[in-house]
């Protein structure tokens, strides 16, 4: 999978230093993956959920949430949001026009 863009992970890691290792691990694993369906994702990340058109990953024991859009056809993962659990719970990310 091609992760677009790692910059969001790096910026979040600067603000929340305790997330860096978990986000780096996620990026390393996903960059090597060749997923074709959400079931492939769940085989590596059992807690990942398809929510609307996005896939949500729990990061660092559910302290943070990583929301991405996955194109299985092109093997691209688009990072949409990296949020604290509180930010995620506010639900404002669901106002994204691509959420559906």
Image: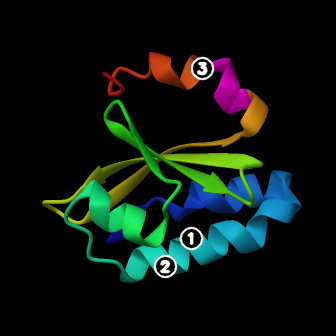
Separation of residues labelled 1 and 3 (CA atoms): 23 Å
* Mark 1 vs 2: CB contact within 8 A: yes
- How packed mark 3 is, by other alpha carbons closer than 10 Å (few <14, some 14-19, many 20 or more), is few
Q: Answer with the quarter of the image where residue 3 lies.
A: bottom left
Residue occupying the point 54% across, 25% down: 93
The x and y percentages for residue 40 are: 30, 67
* Viewer-proximal residue among 72 and 41: 41
Q: Which residues are magenta?
A: 87-91
In the displayed structure image, the side of residue 45 where residue 25 appears, left or right: right
* Mark 1 vs 3: CB contact within 8 A: no
Which disc is residue 91 wearing? 3
* Viewer-proximal residue among 97 and 34: 34
Query: Seen from this angle, which residue lies furthest left?
Result: 73
* Count of all numbered marks drawn on residues in the image: 3
* Viewer-proximal residue among 90 and 9: 90
Instruction: Examine the rendered structure and indicate whether residue 27 appears above or below residue 73.
Output: below
Residue occupying the point 60% across, 20% down: 91
Question: What main secondary structure does the magenta stretch of the protein show?
Answer: helix
- Identify the element where label 2 is drawn: helix
Residue occupying the point 48% across, 53% down: 48
The x and y percentages for residue 27 are: 53, 72
Residue 5 within the segment the image draws in magenta: no
Q: Earlier in the sequence, mark 1 or mark 3?
A: 1
In the displayed structure image, the side of residue 18 where residue 20 appears, left or right: left
Instruction: Examine the rendered structure and indicate whether residue 50 appears above or below residue 35.
Output: above
Which disc is residue 88 wearing? none
* Viewer-proximal residue among 38 and 80: 38
Label 2 sits on residue = 29
Label 1 sits on residue = 26
- How packed mark 2 is, by other alpha carbons closer than 10 Å (few <14, some 14-19, many 20 or more), is few
Separation of residues labelled 1 and 2 (CA atoms): 5 Å
């Amino acid at each position: 999978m091609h992760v677009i863009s790692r910059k969001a992970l790096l910026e979040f890691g600067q603000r929340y230093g305790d997330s860096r290792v978990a986000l780096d691990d996620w990026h390393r694993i996903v960059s090597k993956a060749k997923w074709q369906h959400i079931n492939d994702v769940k085989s590596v990340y059992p807690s990942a959920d398809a929510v609307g058109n996005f896939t949500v990953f729990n990061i660092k024991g559910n302290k943070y949430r990583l929301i991405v859009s996955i194109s299985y056809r092109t093997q691209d993962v688009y990072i949409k949001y990296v949020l604290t659990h509180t930010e995620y719970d506010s639900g404002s990310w669901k106002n994204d026009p691509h959420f559906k």
